[in-house]
Amino acid sequence: MPLGFLHVVARGLAWLATNVAPYRPKVVSENLAHAFPDLDVRARRRLTRDYYRGYADVMVELLKSARISAEELRARLQFTNSELLHAELAAGRPVVLFAAHQCNWEWILLRLSVDGLPVDCAYKPLVNDWADREMRALRTRFGARVVAVPAMMRDVLARRRVPRVIALVSDQEPVASERRHWTRFLNRDSAFFMGGEVLVEKLGYPAYFVAIRRVGRGRYEARFELLAAAGSQFGAGELTERYARRVEQQIREAPADWPWSHKRWRLRREVS
Protein backbone atom coordinates (compact mmCIF):
# COMPACT_ATOMS: atom_id res chain seq x y z
CA MET A 1 0.00 0.00 0.00
CA PRO A 2 1.27 3.53 -0.69
CA LEU A 3 2.31 5.49 2.36
CA GLY A 4 -0.28 8.17 1.62
CA PHE A 5 -3.06 5.63 2.10
CA LEU A 6 -1.45 4.32 5.28
CA HIS A 7 -1.34 7.87 6.64
CA VAL A 8 -5.11 8.12 6.11
CA VAL A 9 -5.49 4.94 8.14
CA ALA A 10 -3.17 6.40 10.79
CA ARG A 11 -5.36 9.48 11.20
CA GLY A 12 -8.30 7.21 11.95
CA LEU A 13 -6.26 5.23 14.44
CA ALA A 14 -5.16 8.45 16.14
CA TRP A 15 -8.78 9.58 16.46
CA LEU A 16 -9.72 6.24 18.03
CA ALA A 17 -6.74 6.39 20.42
CA THR A 18 -7.74 9.91 21.45
CA ASN A 19 -11.55 9.73 21.63
CA VAL A 20 -12.85 6.15 21.64
CA ALA A 21 -10.29 3.87 23.26
CA PRO A 22 -7.71 6.26 24.73
CA TYR A 23 -4.19 4.84 24.74
CA ARG A 24 -2.54 5.37 28.14
CA PRO A 25 -4.28 8.72 28.69
CA LYS A 26 -3.16 9.04 32.32
CA VAL A 27 0.49 8.41 31.41
CA VAL A 28 0.39 10.98 28.60
CA SER A 29 -1.44 13.55 30.72
CA GLU A 30 0.92 13.18 33.69
CA ASN A 31 4.06 13.30 31.55
CA LEU A 32 2.94 16.43 29.71
CA ALA A 33 1.85 18.13 32.94
CA HIS A 34 5.31 17.66 34.45
CA ALA A 35 7.19 18.62 31.29
CA PHE A 36 5.10 21.68 30.41
CA PRO A 37 3.50 23.05 33.59
CA ASP A 38 2.93 26.47 31.99
CA LEU A 39 0.64 25.14 29.24
CA ASP A 40 -3.06 25.75 29.75
CA VAL A 41 -5.64 22.99 29.33
CA ARG A 42 -6.40 23.87 25.72
CA ALA A 43 -2.73 23.90 24.67
CA ARG A 44 -2.06 20.60 26.43
CA ARG A 45 -5.10 19.03 24.77
CA ARG A 46 -3.85 20.20 21.38
CA LEU A 47 -0.39 18.80 22.10
CA THR A 48 -1.93 15.47 23.11
CA ARG A 49 -3.90 15.34 19.86
CA ASP A 50 -0.78 16.12 17.80
CA TYR A 51 1.18 13.46 19.68
CA TYR A 52 -1.34 10.72 18.90
CA ARG A 53 -1.45 11.79 15.26
CA GLY A 54 2.32 11.80 14.89
CA TYR A 55 2.75 8.53 16.76
CA ALA A 56 0.14 6.83 14.58
CA ASP A 57 1.98 8.06 11.50
CA VAL A 58 5.22 6.57 12.81
CA MET A 59 3.53 3.23 13.47
CA VAL A 60 2.25 2.89 9.89
CA GLU A 61 5.61 4.11 8.59
CA LEU A 62 7.19 1.31 10.59
CA LEU A 63 4.92 -1.18 8.81
CA LYS A 64 5.87 0.39 5.48
CA SER A 65 9.55 -0.15 6.36
CA ALA A 66 9.17 -3.83 5.51
CA ARG A 67 8.64 -2.94 1.83
CA ILE A 68 9.94 0.60 1.38
CA SER A 69 12.57 0.98 -1.34
CA ALA A 70 15.98 2.52 -0.78
CA GLU A 71 15.07 5.34 -3.16
CA GLU A 72 11.89 6.25 -1.30
CA LEU A 73 13.68 6.07 2.03
CA ARG A 74 16.36 8.49 0.78
CA ALA A 75 13.64 10.88 -0.35
CA ARG A 76 11.70 10.69 2.91
CA LEU A 77 14.64 10.95 5.33
CA GLN A 78 17.34 13.40 4.30
CA PHE A 79 20.79 13.38 5.92
CA THR A 80 22.34 16.85 5.86
CA ASN A 81 25.92 15.98 6.86
CA SER A 82 26.50 12.23 6.90
CA GLU A 83 29.95 12.92 5.46
CA LEU A 84 31.08 13.40 9.07
CA LEU A 85 30.43 9.74 9.83
CA HIS A 86 31.95 8.60 6.53
CA ALA A 87 35.12 10.53 7.37
CA GLU A 88 35.42 8.90 10.80
CA LEU A 89 35.06 5.41 9.34
CA ALA A 90 37.47 6.22 6.50
CA ALA A 91 40.03 7.11 9.18
CA GLY A 92 39.55 3.66 10.70
CA ARG A 93 37.55 4.81 13.72
CA PRO A 94 34.31 3.21 14.93
CA VAL A 95 31.67 5.79 15.92
CA VAL A 96 29.18 5.67 18.79
CA LEU A 97 25.94 7.26 17.61
CA PHE A 98 23.43 8.42 20.23
CA ALA A 99 19.80 8.69 19.08
CA ALA A 100 16.46 9.27 20.82
CA HIS A 101 12.88 8.15 20.29
CA GLN A 102 12.04 11.28 18.31
CA CYS A 103 9.94 11.29 15.12
CA ASN A 104 10.58 8.10 13.14
CA TRP A 105 13.69 6.82 14.90
CA GLU A 106 13.47 3.41 13.19
CA TRP A 107 14.10 4.95 9.78
CA ILE A 108 17.42 6.38 10.98
CA LEU A 109 18.90 2.89 11.24
CA LEU A 110 17.62 1.88 7.80
CA ARG A 111 18.79 5.14 6.24
CA LEU A 112 22.30 4.74 7.66
CA SER A 113 22.53 1.36 5.95
CA VAL A 114 21.17 2.76 2.68
CA ASP A 115 23.82 5.49 2.94
CA GLY A 116 26.47 2.77 2.81
CA LEU A 117 27.45 2.91 6.47
CA PRO A 118 28.05 -0.37 8.35
CA VAL A 119 25.89 -0.28 11.48
CA ASP A 120 25.69 -2.31 14.67
CA CYS A 121 22.50 -1.46 16.55
CA ALA A 122 21.82 -2.28 20.20
CA TYR A 123 18.29 -3.56 20.73
CA LYS A 124 16.17 -4.92 23.54
CA PRO A 125 14.74 -8.34 22.55
CA LEU A 126 10.94 -8.43 22.51
CA VAL A 127 9.04 -10.89 24.69
CA ASN A 128 7.04 -12.30 21.78
CA ASP A 129 9.26 -14.50 19.59
CA TRP A 130 7.36 -13.73 16.38
CA ALA A 131 7.45 -9.96 16.96
CA ASP A 132 11.14 -10.13 17.88
CA ARG A 133 11.96 -12.05 14.71
CA GLU A 134 10.00 -9.65 12.50
CA MET A 135 11.58 -6.55 14.07
CA ARG A 136 15.07 -7.95 13.62
CA ALA A 137 14.28 -8.75 9.99
CA LEU A 138 12.97 -5.23 9.44
CA ARG A 139 15.95 -3.51 11.04
CA THR A 140 18.49 -5.57 9.13
CA ARG A 141 16.89 -5.56 5.66
CA PHE A 142 19.41 -3.04 4.29
CA GLY A 143 22.45 -4.65 5.94
CA ALA A 144 22.58 -3.45 9.56
CA ARG A 145 23.51 -5.82 12.40
CA VAL A 146 21.39 -5.94 15.55
CA VAL A 147 22.95 -6.95 18.85
CA ALA A 148 20.95 -7.69 21.99
CA VAL A 149 21.77 -5.23 24.78
CA PRO A 150 23.09 -7.91 27.20
CA ALA A 151 25.63 -9.00 24.58
CA MET A 152 26.54 -5.52 23.32
CA MET A 153 29.69 -4.96 25.36
CA ARG A 154 31.15 -8.35 24.45
CA ASP A 155 30.34 -7.79 20.79
CA VAL A 156 31.94 -4.34 20.76
CA LEU A 157 35.12 -5.65 22.35
CA ALA A 158 35.31 -8.55 19.92
CA ARG A 159 34.96 -6.10 16.98
CA ARG A 160 36.69 -3.12 18.55
CA ARG A 161 38.93 -2.46 15.54
CA VAL A 162 36.16 -2.75 12.93
CA PRO A 163 35.17 0.73 11.62
CA ARG A 164 31.39 1.00 11.91
CA VAL A 165 28.59 2.97 13.50
CA ILE A 166 27.47 1.65 16.89
CA ALA A 167 23.90 2.97 17.24
CA LEU A 168 22.29 3.42 20.65
CA VAL A 169 18.80 4.75 21.39
CA SER A 170 19.39 5.69 25.02
CA ASP A 171 16.47 7.82 26.21
CA GLN A 172 14.50 4.98 27.77
CA GLU A 173 14.67 4.27 31.49
CA PRO A 174 17.49 1.88 32.48
CA VAL A 175 15.35 -0.33 34.70
CA ALA A 176 17.54 -3.43 34.29
CA SER A 177 20.86 -1.61 34.56
CA GLU A 178 22.60 -0.86 37.84
CA ARG A 179 24.86 1.78 36.28
CA ARG A 180 22.81 4.96 35.82
CA HIS A 181 23.32 8.67 35.47
CA TRP A 182 20.78 10.81 37.31
CA THR A 183 19.84 14.29 36.11
CA ARG A 184 16.90 16.66 35.80
CA PHE A 185 15.10 15.90 32.55
CA LEU A 186 11.78 17.48 31.56
CA ASN A 187 11.44 18.81 35.13
CA ARG A 188 11.84 15.42 36.80
CA ASP A 189 14.66 13.36 38.27
CA SER A 190 15.54 10.93 35.49
CA ALA A 191 17.95 8.02 35.07
CA PHE A 192 19.92 7.48 31.85
CA PHE A 193 21.89 4.55 30.48
CA MET A 194 25.66 4.97 30.74
CA GLY A 195 26.64 2.18 28.35
CA GLY A 196 27.43 4.56 25.50
CA GLU A 197 29.61 6.70 27.72
CA VAL A 198 31.54 3.61 28.86
CA LEU A 199 32.25 2.66 25.23
CA VAL A 200 33.46 6.13 24.34
CA GLU A 201 35.59 6.45 27.46
CA LYS A 202 37.18 3.00 27.48
CA LEU A 203 37.77 2.63 23.73
CA GLY A 204 38.39 6.24 22.75
CA TYR A 205 35.67 6.29 20.07
CA PRO A 206 34.16 9.56 18.85
CA ALA A 207 30.54 10.14 19.85
CA TYR A 208 27.83 11.81 17.78
CA PHE A 209 24.19 12.72 18.37
CA VAL A 210 21.71 12.35 15.51
CA ALA A 211 19.11 15.12 15.64
CA ILE A 212 15.95 14.44 13.64
CA ARG A 213 13.02 16.71 12.85
CA ARG A 214 9.76 16.36 10.93
CA VAL A 215 9.65 18.51 7.79
CA GLY A 216 6.38 17.12 6.39
CA ARG A 217 4.06 14.19 6.75
CA GLY A 218 6.25 11.10 6.37
CA ARG A 219 9.28 13.30 5.66
CA TYR A 220 12.19 13.97 8.00
CA GLU A 221 15.60 15.59 8.13
CA ALA A 222 18.52 14.44 10.29
CA ARG A 223 21.93 15.92 11.03
CA PHE A 224 24.87 14.61 13.03
CA GLU A 225 26.40 16.61 15.89
CA LEU A 226 29.70 15.84 17.60
CA LEU A 227 29.33 15.08 21.30
CA ALA A 228 32.93 13.99 21.93
CA ALA A 229 35.93 13.72 19.62
CA ALA A 230 38.01 10.54 19.49
CA GLY A 231 40.14 10.16 22.60
CA SER A 232 38.29 12.85 24.57
CA GLN A 233 38.61 12.91 28.35
CA PHE A 234 35.60 13.80 30.50
CA GLY A 235 34.30 13.32 34.02
CA ALA A 236 31.93 10.57 35.11
CA GLY A 237 28.48 11.21 33.66
CA GLU A 238 29.58 14.21 31.60
CA LEU A 239 28.96 12.68 28.17
CA THR A 240 25.63 11.21 29.28
CA GLU A 241 24.66 14.64 30.59
CA ARG A 242 25.49 16.22 27.21
CA TYR A 243 23.26 13.65 25.57
CA ALA A 244 20.40 14.24 28.03
CA ARG A 245 20.53 18.00 27.47
CA ARG A 246 20.51 17.58 23.69
CA VAL A 247 17.57 15.18 23.83
CA GLU A 248 15.64 17.60 26.03
CA GLN A 249 16.35 20.46 23.63
CA GLN A 250 15.09 18.37 20.71
CA ILE A 251 11.91 17.47 22.58
CA ARG A 252 11.15 21.08 23.50
CA GLU A 253 11.63 22.14 19.88
CA ALA A 254 9.03 19.58 18.70
CA PRO A 255 7.24 18.12 21.74
CA ALA A 256 4.58 16.21 19.80
CA ASP A 257 7.26 14.00 18.24
CA TRP A 258 8.45 12.29 21.45
CA PRO A 259 6.60 9.21 22.85
CA TRP A 260 4.76 10.61 25.87
CA SER A 261 2.88 7.34 26.38
CA HIS A 262 6.10 5.58 27.42
CA LYS A 263 6.46 4.97 31.15
CA ARG A 264 9.73 6.86 31.42
CA TRP A 265 9.72 7.68 35.13
CA ARG A 266 9.20 4.43 37.04
CA LEU A 267 12.49 4.66 38.96
CA ARG A 268 12.86 6.87 42.00
CA ARG A 269 16.16 8.52 42.74
CA GLU A 270 16.11 7.85 46.47
CA VAL A 271 15.46 4.12 45.88
CA SER A 272 18.31 3.88 43.39
Image (cartoon, helix red, strand yellow):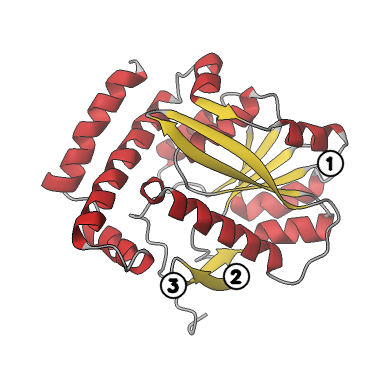
Residue closer to the observer: 185 or 66:
185
Marks 2/1: CA–CA distance: 27 Å
Which residue is identified by label 2? 180
Marks 3/1: CA–CA distance: 36 Å
Marks 2/3: CA–CA distance: 15 Å
Q: In which quarter of the image is residue 241?
A: bottom right
233 on left or right of 269 = right
195 on left or right of 258 = right
Type of amino acid under label 3? Arg
Name the residue rendered at 20%, 44% in the picture: 17
Query: Can residue 22 be seen in this snapshot?
Result: yes
- Which of the marked residues, 2 or 1, is nearer the chain's N terminus? 1
Which residue is identified by label 1? 93
Type of amino acid under label 2? Arg
Name the residue rendered at 79%, 42% in the picture: 94
8 on left or right of 90 = left
Which residue is identified by label 3? 188
